[in-house]
Amino acid sequence: MRYRPFGASGAAISALTLSLGIDCLGRGLAAANELIYAALEAGINSYRLETADPVLAEVVGQALSNVDRKLLNVSLELGTGDGRRGSERDFSAEGMTGAIDRCLHISGLGWIDVALLEEPGEDELPQTSLNALKALRATGRVRYLGVSGETAVMDAYVSTGAFDVLATPFHVNVDWRIRSRVRAAREQDMAILAYGYFPSELDSEKKAVTLHQPKKGLFGFGGGSGGRPKDDPLAGAGTFAFLHRTPHWTAEAICLAHAMADPAISSVLIRAVDSERLNVLAAVPERDMPPGLSAQIEMARVAA
């Protein structure tokens, strides 16, 4: 496993962060524990709880209890309810303070490294809530404050200087607005957590080839693979087709390696429901991308 600086904190964080939600409990508590143990064995020291669900908090706390807490980075996502069906977003001072205190009490983690607010709307985060978060940080229950999302309002939250961490989509075809936001966050010494590294629009070769190509017109013109027949060796040139045609690499592995290679990214969020998939993803940081792939990614992006 490789490690990166966590913003300006001076701490080191693994290139991968294991994101844990209610679904990881679906195979039973023993399987959930096995997943976290596999992550620890792979060198992953960063974990995100997707909800403040008490069972999830207890499982994570128990699995991490044998590791020096100072070596871990644990984030708690707020604004997603508590994991129960029908539970509502709650960015109130009381709601967020209660969620964090319950999570700490049940998990025994001692503190939450990052309180990560999930896509708060422009008018969804009153000053009283910010004051409550700052009070949690002042008392040591929370170390850093973060925001997560992709809408335009994230620019405003980044510019306030009130947050230490930005969680954002980041992939080979990410919008220029998000790239600009990442640069602005880095200028503020914010740590960047990337998610959505393998978007659905690239998860098959057919999608990767046709992503940026115009649909066929009335008389059949347009579309295709850059105007080339399918059996042309250069069919797919200038597209993301290479993601699915690179020997010994899967498209997902290339996308993950690309996200990790960006110096602005502190860690990339991954999801896994079993140790087998976890180990496949955890092996990617140990590999170097084949020569030329970065250039192909840039050419495909520019071709858009």
Image (spheres, rainbow, N blue to C red):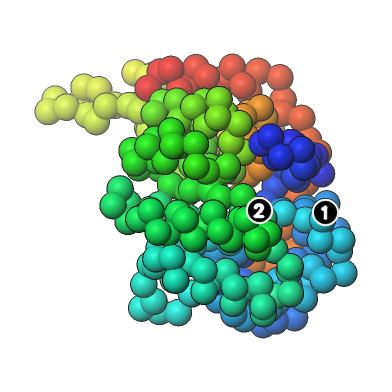
Residue, disc 2: 143
- In the displayed structure image, the side of residue 52 where residue 85 appears, left or right: left
Q: Position of residue 268 (x, y in %)?
A: 63, 44
Q: Amino acid at mark 2?
A: Arg
Please name the residue shown 45% across and 54% down the image.
130
Residue 37 position, x and y percent, is 81, 66
- N-terminal of the two: label 2 or label 1? 1
Secondary element under disc 1, as helix, strand or loop, is helix
277 sits left or right of 269 in the view: right
Q: How many marks?
A: 2
- 34 and 17: which is toward the camera: 17
Distance of label 2 from label 1 (alpha carbons): 14 Å
Question: Is residue 179 shown to the viewer in this render?
Answer: no
At which x and y percent is residue 275?
A: 74, 64
Q: What residue is at 44 percent from the left and 71 percent from the top?
A: 94
Left or right: where does residue 1 sit relative to residue 75?
right
The structure residue drawn at horizontal position 72% and vertical position 25%, both measured from the top left corner, is 290
Task: Using a 10 Å C-alpha cutoff, classify the residue at mark 2 as few (fewer than 14 neighbours), some (14 to 19) or many (20 or more).
Answer: some
Instruction: Identify the residue shown where x is 76% and y is 38%.
Output: 10
Residue situated in front as seen by the camera: 296 or 71: 71
* Amino acid at dot 1: Leu
Q: Depth check: give the residue in front, 39 or 129.
A: 129
Quarter of the image where one finds residue 8: top right
On residue 148, the disc is none
Q: Secondary structure at mark 2?
A: strand
Q: Residue furthest left?
A: 218
Residue that carries the numbered disc 1 in the rendered image = 71
